[in-house]
Amino acid sequence: MQSHCIQQAPELRVPWWIDGEGRSMAPLKLADLGDGFKVIFCFQHWCPGCHSHGFPTLQKLIKALGDRGFAFAAVQTVFEGAESNTFERLRETQLRYGLNIPFGHDPAIGRASSLMADYGTRGTPWFLVIDPLDEVLYSDFEIDERQLIGAFGASNDGLKAA
């Protein structure tokens, strides 16, 4: 896995969240995800690539790394299509993929959401990998899940079934 962007991870400023059960929760902070590695998946509800590639990749990562010190969150980074990419769609998307992780809604302020501005993301789907020192190790549209999983000694067996 190439390091595309090593920088200190800015604190999350995403205003609205639901927990893994779909209940509203206080804004999530990086520390809430624990002391290990963190994967933040940025998406938009209406994004075809998020559904065809991003969410299936996220499911594979959770299956392989969820018990290896990794924590996960998904954030709807709204930079267009605000009428479709709403807070109310979070639970629908969470259920569609069977993801029991926090989901955030980050509406645009000007041209970009707070996460997009703080992390320099350029669209969706987007993956961020943050290490235990809260440094951004990876930030890009796609991630090679097999390479990431293999780097942490997890098995790639059965990834197609995820």
Image (cartoon, rainbow, N blue to C red):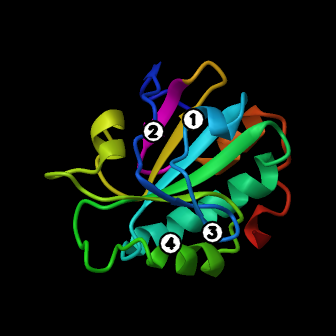
Quadrant of res 62? bottom right
First reached walking from the N terminus: tag 4 or tag 3: 3
Amino acid tagged 4: Leu
- Does the magenta-highlighted stretch encompass residue 131? no
Q: Which label sits on residue 90?
A: 4
Amino acid tagged 2: Leu
Marks 1,3: beta carbons within 8 A: no
Q: Nearer the viewer, residue 24 or 51?
A: 24
Task: Return the residue at label 2.
Answer: 12
Q: Is residue 148 left or right of residue 152?
A: left
Q: Residue furthest left?
A: 110
Separation of marks 1 and 4 at Cα, in angstroms: 20 Å
Amino acid tagged 1: Leu
Residue at left 55%, top 81%?
92
Separation of marks 2 and 3 at Cα, in angstroms: 19 Å
Q: Nearer the viewer, residue 8 or 154?
A: 8
Where does the image place residue 40, in percent across and percent down from the top left?
Answer: 54, 47
Mark 4 secondary-structure assignment: helix
First reached walking from the N terminus: tag 2 or tag 3: 2
Q: Is residue 18 left or right of residue 122?
A: right
Viewer-nearest of discs 1 and 3: 3
Q: Which residues are magenta?
A: 135-142
Q: Specify few, some or many for label 3: CA neighbours under 10 Å numbering under 14, 14-19, or 20 or more.
A: few
Where does the image place residue 16, in percent across and percent down from the top left?
Answer: 45, 58
Task: Return the residue at label 3.
Answer: 23
Q: Is residue 49 above or below residue 66?
A: below
Marks 2,3: beta carbons within 8 A: no
Q: Is residue 110 left or right of residue 132?
A: left
